[in-house]
Image (tube, grey):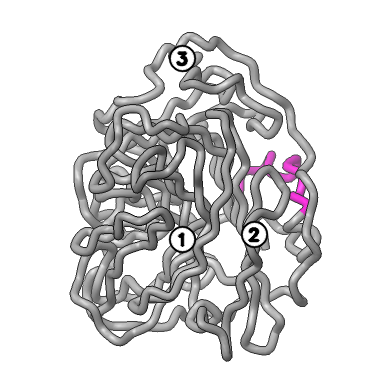
Amino acid sequence: MRRAIFPRALTLAPCAAAAALLAVASCSSSRSSASGAPPDAGPTDASTTDDGSKDGTTTDGTSTGGDTGPLPEAAPTDAGTPPDADASTIEVPVPASGAGFHSLVFEDDFTTADTIATSATAASGFKWYWSFDGNAQPWSVHTTATAGSIANGNDGGGGNASPHGGILTVTGPGEPNDALITVPGGALNNAQAVLPAEGQGCWAHAYFEAYIQFQIDGTGSSDASTGWPAFWSWSVQGLHGYGFGGSSLTTANYSEIDFMETYGTIFGNQPGNWTATMHQWPANVSSDGHTQHTDSDWHTYGCLWTSTGSGTGQVKFYLDGAQVDQTVDSGTGQTQFSLEGMYQFIVLGTGKGWDMNVDWVRVWQ
């Protein structure tokens, strides 16, 4: 994904550029685990499809993109609290269920802006925080919109749309590919900061999933320096004394999982190409894989991270409930060895002029 100082190499299979840590610290609570990696899963069951106008506006009359004005002051919502009461009606995805992950430990369907921090320096109390670069707000929340009402080159809301509505539109850029994260990156940028515990916006061994829509041709963005749509994660240990942004390289090791990133025509790609990738930093050890969808519709992107219980694990990537790309081994004796000792927080971001719409984000354990 993006790094402020070292841009991604311009290749057909681009890898994220290296950023680094000044110090590494451990989270304070014990890790969760699952018993082994599950078999490959088929498509998830569909939930109610939302209907709405397809005239390029949301159902509340708000533009689907470009609204970068300040969010209203919000009452804090603790990222560590249980999901909303009606979350019990959400069916467990097949990949999560197969791994024994039945608890919805994080969710946001963006029916309110109250889950997003109101300043770049907020330290607690929210599900989403501004990324460390601190640029002007590159997102908007349309609380009464539905997936079916976003006419951005797609064909309706799709079968996995939230019945509650609510759309987050990431307009970009913060720094390329990041706008919102699930831990307070700016607040952790000092050597005395106490990192969040596992479960407080960062997780080990879980199924990560989001329902996302973007135009596959990149619209107004053709410059790699501004970024591209991405749903990904980063080791929370990489924030201690460092924050989320550029730095000089060190010998410390940390991990990145790109659940989905797409390039349009950037790097010489064809529209619709996207990758699911594991990275071991600061060494550029990666597991780039490529797949494609030829539409600008809504899709469910997922990542299953399981543990063997003996210091090793596996990562699998999913599109609309079916596995894509290779299974990546992690932990002891693997090139991706650092992941098993870390917790991952979620990042949402995109490029300038290339809106990414997000209906919901969920984490199962």
Residue 108 part of the magenta-drawn span = no
Q: Earlier in the sequence, mark 2 or mark 1?
A: 2
**Left or right: 102 with respect to 187?**
right
Q: Which residue is mark 1?
A: 233
Q: Residue flagged by tag 3: what amino acid is it?
A: Asp
Q: Residue flagged by tag 1: what amino acid is it?
A: Ser
Q: Residues within 10 Å of mark 2 (few under 14, many from 20)?
A: many
Q: Residue flagged by tag 2: what amino acid is it?
A: Tyr
Identify the magenta region: 83-94
Q: Is residue 133 positioned above or below 359 on the image? A: below
> In the drawing, what numbered circle is on residue 207?
2
Q: Is residue 28 positioned above or below 246 on the image? A: below
Q: Which residue is mark 3?
A: 60
> In the drawing, what numbered circle is on residue 199?
none
Q: Label 3 vs label 2: CA separation?
A: 32 Å
Q: Is residue 303 visible?
A: yes
Q: Residue at coordinates 59% horizontally, 56% vertically from top-left? A: 208
Q: Residue at coordinates 26% horizontally, 30% vertically from top-left? A: 68
Label 1: state its secondary structure. strand
Q: Is residue 21 positioned above or below 350 on the image? A: below
**Left or right: 80 with respect to 172?**
right
Picture quarter with the C terminus: bottom right
Q: Is residue 105 visible?
A: no
Q: Position of residue 45 (x, y in %)?
A: 79, 40
Q: Earlier in the sequence, mark 3 or mark 2?
A: 3
